[in-house]
Structure formats: C-alpha cells, structure tokens
Amino acid sequence: MTTTRPPEAPTKSKTKNPRIGVFICHCGINIAGVVDVKKVADNFREVPGVVHSIDYKYMCSNPGQELITRTIKEKKLDGVIVAACSPRMHELTFRKAGLKAGLNPYRVEIANIREQCSWVHKDEKDKATEKADQIISSIFEKVKGDQVLDVFHSEVKKKALVIGAGIAGIQVALDIAQAGYPVILVERESYIGGHMTKLAETFPTLDCAACILTPRTVEVSQTPNIKIHTYSEIEEVSGLVGDFKVK
C-alpha cells in the first residue's frame, strides 16, 4: 500500500503530568441502576492525573457530547475516558466529541461498564461498583500510555488474487474481471474446474455439470485481464488489506 506521506512511527504522549477526564454515563438505569456511579466519580477525583471526573445521565446524547467537548477545552484535557456501554456502540461518537475539541481522537477511550459490568452483575451492586472502578482503572493506565495516531490515506492496489480454480473460484474471477479489475487465478492442479469436472450432475437441480462448467472455463481462459497459473501453490501470504504480498 502506498501512503500519501512517508510512514512515521507513532508518537507516544510526552505529557509528564497527564490531564485526564473521566466521564461516567448512567445509561438511564442500565448502569446507574446497578453501579453507584456517583461513588465511582468521587473515587476517580482522588486519582493523580485525573483532573476532572463527572457522571451524567446519557453521555451519548447531544448535551452529553457537548459536556465532553466543553470540558476538554476548559480543563485542557489531554486524555479522556468515557465509562459507558460497549465501544462498538459509541466509540466513534465520543472520539468525534474529542476531535471537535481539538483532542486527538485516539486519546479517547471507552471503559465498558454496561455489558461487562452492570448487565452481568445486576444482583451484586457493591461488587459491580467495585468492578466498574477496576475497569476504569485499567483504561486509565491505557490512556496514560496511548499513542497519538494520525489518520492518513493510502492507495490500494486494485488487483485481485483468487486461490483455487474450482467453479466458485472461476465465477469469482469472472465477476471481478467484469468489474474492470485484473485477476490472478491460482490452481494447484494441471487443469481448472476442480471437483465439478468429475461430476455428471449438480444438486439440487440435477443439471448437467459439464454444461455449466465448460462455458465458464472457456470464458475465464479467454478473458484478457485474468491470468491463470496452474500447477501452482501458495507458499506464503503477508502484508495487509490493500497491500498483500503472496509467494
């Protein structure tokens, strides 16, 4: 993958005296009905490095997001913990709130005290409160060591590799090629078509297997932007999405 700027090692936060804010969401009664959110907020006011700790009914609401954004600016926070629901739900929401205040979004972390705490310990309120403290404490340590990351765009190589030239691989190769992208089709046998070449009929329609397969093998062989490698096997795959390297 070709980046739009030279790759740089992520820069670790160099703040010797972190200024972290802790925002604890009630989530209505989903969290506050089990966890003593006010006690948790009070506990973190005593933690060195935490300069602001507050609980609020719905952090994901517009007023809740505005509270986070405003506090980052007023308290000059360099890190934020939102103790709320799963990050799958609102991580992006809270990171956008941080970005709006000028904070690197990757300095905003979510402590899941709903799915991983209040919902599974609804009959043990004291223990749930203690666990919420521990979950937030672990995220606090993470935020202290978080790296400041920069988002950048990269150029994806618009080429596809299809491994296996059975009927499925052939059809995939044809579909991709017809969309305008070059395809490399790799097959370890000396022929393409896979197991379907050995069948008389297909299930459940009982159609003639050769009648389905033969036109496709001819088409895939004659398609200019499909390159077929038979008697070939993959030894190694490395890289990442958009920039795989295959040997």
Image (cartoon, grey):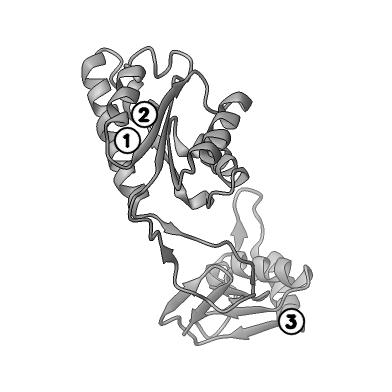
Q: Earlier in the sequence, mark 3 or mark 2?
A: 2
The percent position of residue 196, horizontal first and vertical second, equals 57, 67
Along the viewing direction, whichever of 120 and 163 lies nearer the viewer: 120
Residue 201 placement: quadrant: bottom right
* Residue at x-position 35% and y-position 18%: 38
* Residue at x-position 30% and y-position 30%: 44
Label 3 element class: loop
Q: Label 3: which residue?
A: 225
Badge 3, how many Cα within 10 Å: few under 14, some, many 20+? some
Asked if marks 2 and 1 touch (Cβ < 8 Å), the reply is yes
Report how far apart the C-alphas of labels 3 and 2 lie in the structure: 52 Å
The amino acid type, in three-letter code, at marker 1 is Ile
Asked if marks 3 and 2 touch (Cβ < 8 Å), the reply is no
Residue 19 placement: quadrant: top left
The percent position of residue 192, horizontal first and vertical second, equals 59, 78
Label 1 element class: helix
* Residue at x-position 72% and y-position 66%: 175
The amino acid type, in three-letter code, at marker 2 is Ile
The dot on residue 113 is 2
Badge 2, how many Cα within 10 Å: few under 14, some, many 20+? many
Residue 157 placement: quadrant: bottom right
